[in-house]
Image: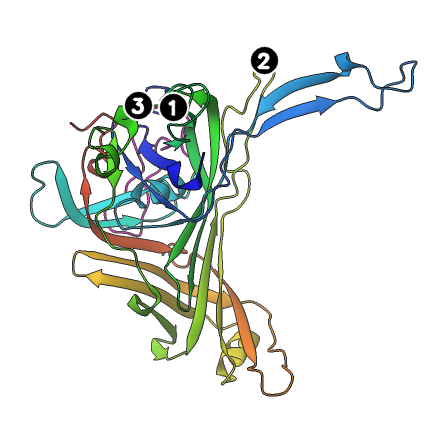
Amino acid sequence: MQGWELLFRVSENPYGFGSTLGQGEGMYLEAVSDDVGYNQQIREREDRMKRGRFTTADSFTVDEAEPGGPFPCVPRTDDMIGFLMAHFQCVGYAAIGTAHAGIGTGTLTFIPIDNPPDWSGTVWGTTTDGIVATSADIFSLNFDKIYGENLETGQYVNNGLQILNAVVTQLEFAQRLGEDLQMTPQLEAKTGDVSAAFGVNYFPDDTTGAGSMGSFSDIAQFVDWQGTVTYSRGGVATSLELQEINYLFNNGQEGRRRLGTKNRTRFPFSGRPQHTGDLQWEFDRTDVLDDMIAKGSVAIKSRWYGDDLHWMEIDQPHCHLLPSDPKGAGGDSSVMHTQPFRAFPYNGTPASIVRICTTFATKVWSFPFGEGTYDA
């Protein structure tokens, strides 16, 4: 099998956490690397006092699996929607015009929920103003890794990995000079199947002409020159000659098991969420260091613009700069500076507000309409 045979597909789970029914159509994704797996765990008991120098075979057991992993990819405004919801768990939707022929157009606003969601039900977290979040039931994804057609088992037989009921415990965005915007969701799933059978219908339309389970996005990716970053203190913007910006959203979730179950059953919000990042540029000013030392609040907003109906922004209105010092470089090398920061909620405003404007298929993403059912 060759790397070009792989397909990666994400779909929503509109029937609630724990359901194995999944969704019909999904989005096929442009992967940067492949790090999602079944992640089978084993247990070896080398420390038991049992006569004999060698460990016996009965001391080895195959235990729980931990399906999931990081998935670095190049996002589009329509195929990132599910990952954002599976992380932030709260969305507001403002339609532009009227949805027709299964296509919705509008602005989706994602903010973190304040309280942990329920682990059953199909009422998703919502916001009407982009500031106050209403906690509800957990939203999860299904993720398919389709290996291809040339396996020994035969065409479309046991030809992929499927993980069900996945949440996004961490979400990263990275924009580097001369590169496309990259997104890395950390998927953590309840169940998985290492030998799922994906028939010809699971291949996207533009690959075989026979697919009915979704397609690749027709929307262009974001590139570095489409992104702008605004750094403000006291409402006054400062221009920074940035070469890189990184974001890390961490929900503080952990997988939990209980007696009588082999795999993880839920992923509670056991730690405080942290929204961090860093700015990187050729060091040319000290006022940012003054902001760091003064522990002053700064606002950082990044925006990627394709056109009026396809854009994305990450707005963090209350950030504190974390300790960092510029380091010298030898000779005529540039002195680069990396300034880490952390965003905090303040006066009722969320730590982070992520907005995207896009067109999307309502069969693929039905949750912006507040429905816990399949949107045909």
- In the shown orientation, is residue 319 left or right of residue 62? left
Q: How crowded is mark 2: few (under 14 residues within 10 Å), some or many (20 or more)?
A: few
Q: In terms of image quadrants, where is residue 292?
A: bottom right
Give the label, 1 or 2, closer to the camera. 2
* Residue at 55% from the left image edge and 42% from the top image edge: 271
For marks 2 and 3, give the CA distance: 24 Å
- In the shown orientation, is residue 93 left or right of residue 250? left
Give the label, 1 or 3, closer to the camera. 3
* Residue at 58% from the left image edge and 83% from the top image edge: 333
Measured as percent of width and height from the top left, residue 314 is found at 35, 59
For numbered disc 3, what is the local secondary structure? loop
For marks 1 and 2, give the CA distance: 19 Å
Kindly identify which numbered label has been placed on residue 260.
2
Kindly identify which numbered label has been placed on residue 15.
3
Disc 1 target residue: 120
For marks 1 and 3, give the CA distance: 9 Å
Q: Identify the magenta region.
A: 116-140
